[in-house]
Image (spheres, helix red, strand yellow):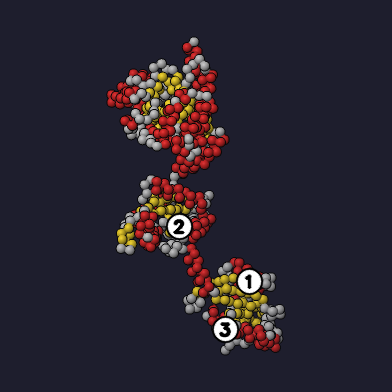
Amino acid sequence: MAPAPVGEEAGATAAAGGTATARTVGFTPMAQPATVRTEFTAPAEPSFRSAFWAAPLAMAVVDREGLVVSANETCGALLGTPPDELAGQVAADLVDLTSDARAWHAYREVLRGRQARMRCTRLLKHPDGRSLWVQVTLAPLPAGSGGVLLSLTDISARRELQNRLRHLQSHDPVTRLPNRTLFFERLSAALEAGPQPESDPEPEPGSYERGGTGRIGLCYLDLDGFKAINDTLGHRVGDRLLAAVAERLTRCADEAGYGRASAPLVARLGGDEFALLVEDSTGTEQLAALAESVLTALQAPFEISGRRLSVSASIGVVERQTDGTSATALMQAADTTLYWAKADGRARWTLFDPERNAHRMTRQALVSTLRAAVERGEFTLEYQPLVGMEDGRLRGVEALVRWRHPQFGVLTPNRFIALAEEDGSIVPLGRWILATACRQARRWQLDHPGEPPIFVSVNVAVRQVWDSDLVADVAEVLAETGLAPHLLQLELTESAVMGSAGRPLQTLRALSDMGVHIAIDDFGTGYSNLAYLSRLPVSVLKLDGSFVRGFQHEERTGAADEVIVEAMIQLAHRLGLSVTAECVETSDQASRLRRIGCDTGQGWLYSRPVSPDRISELLDDHACGRR
């Protein structure tokens, strides 16, 4: 029998005495007694009654105690219960409002008249087993009715469409893996969650909740050789290869087996870059094992479109505590470590090394401030004496640049010269060194007019020859300082001079014609074409210190070492070149080098690199000795 219309039910109640009785079943959240009496007057307008029963929208009238008074046919069909059976039931239980604290609070406020309306979305279980997404709306009935109107809208189809769109937006269409957006959502959520407090100081093994270890791990990988396959065989084959790689990576993640912890998230970040995110990781050993399994999985060739294709992977591995770690910092560390893996030979995994990263960061800090440091005047020169082997006289000095870095202290050339050559700042730095050294040499000459003037030797990088007009720079400096050309010696490494052709050779010849001496530094470490050496405008050979170190102790030195050095000196003399020995540290070395005809010595036996004032003192001491 169909329930009476709301208006008729209210009228019958009024005729009987104006009250209606409803029985509450287990309505404990409202703290009501098991049975309550409540006044309920339905609106009497015929239009309301007609709309209520005929509406395609599921609706139910709920009294102020939260009990269903009546429901329409659409509501019964939606909930899978005849409308007459819904009457008297607790409305909050029917639409699962008690499981959500915010919805439950808003619901009670509407029932009590403290809030005008509420709306929420709930997931309900239909009696036939289906799951329904329902939008729940609660609004008061017209004044005097004493109840509220509960309306339900089935939004399952809309939610399904939204989920499908969301899946398309968050997954890669080629590999069907989570894409970069979803990966970073998961990563950020894992970092924000952090470790969860443990209620038991000694929990069962594996009983921690997600985030219980307070750690996170990442394997960031890039395919070696993929670009060549993609470029030669086309993007279709490349995409199929990426999909096949994704399958193997997913299998590795599924087979990882980390107890109760979830499997690593496998994502494609773009191109041929993939990531395996391990939430709640247990240490570097776990990440290392995962990386090793990935390398093993990718070793077997792939069968793609009738072709056997092979790729490997370089993997950067990072594992650390979530506390104090940001997504940006983690990805920067992973990217740096991936670069190390490729630089170390590819087809391997490399673990993040804080010390190695600190060196890289220091290097980057130096590179970024090199040019500005020249302008700020952070560089200074020290000078190491070049002494005649026969008489011990000071013949010249080599200018050695130092960087007085405000953060890292005094840095020697091996820390920054190569960086300056890479970014081109060696050109302005080289001009400054040249001008400063020549100005200082001229000052010594003027301060010691009674002494033979000493020459200054300045190191020149190959890039200075290519990226600047070195001849013009030297001519300008000599003119400004008044230093004679023969008192300037320019040092270039053997690898830079040997095989010179075109502009470098023209530059060297122009400088030599000007009267400037050209020296080959670190001679003997490269592959010298000695016949070609005779055609270069070189006047000095500086023997590399490795040869001189063999003269440390006479009884430990084989005859062959001395024969080689003596032959090099004799060859240089036959070509009209003088020879300077670097790294002379003992008197035994000096005497043996003197015996085989070496012209000049440089090293700690004579002096370490010193300030210009100390060179002035040496010149003064020599003048006093003569007098």
Category of crowding for the residue at label 1, using alpha-carbon neighbours closer than 10 angstroms: few (below 14), some (14–19), many (at least 20):
some
230 lies above or below 430: below
**Which residue in the structure is indicated by mark 3?**
73
The residue at 28%/26% (across/down) is: 560
Q: For the N terminus, give its image quadrant.
A: bottom right
The residue at 43%/36% (across/down) is: 462
- Give the CA distance from mark 1 to mark 3: 23 Å
Q: Nearer the viewer, residue 600 or 404?
A: 600
Residue 118 marker: 1
Asked whether residue 415 is in view, the answer is: no
Q: Evaluate if marks 1 and 2 touch, with contact meaning CB atoms under 8 Å apart.
A: no
Q: Quadrant of residue 103?
A: bottom right
- Give the CA distance from mark 1 to mark 2: 41 Å
- Give the CA distance from mark 3 to mark 2: 51 Å
Category of crowding for the residue at label 2, using alpha-carbon neighbours closer than 10 angstroms: few (below 14), some (14–19), many (at least 20):
many
Q: Nearer the viewer, mark 1 or mark 2?
A: 2
Instruction: Give how far across and how far down residue 148 sits, in percent.
Output: 65, 77
**Which residue in the structure is indicated by mark 2?**
269
For the residue marked with disc 3, what is the amino acid? Glu
Q: Evaluate if marks 3 and 2 touch, with contact meaning CB atoms under 8 Å apart.
A: no
Q: Nearer the viewer, mark 3 or mark 2?
A: 2
Q: Nearer the viewer, residue 280 or 159?
A: 159
Instruction: Determine whether the residue tagged by mark 3 lies in a helix, strand or loop.
Output: helix
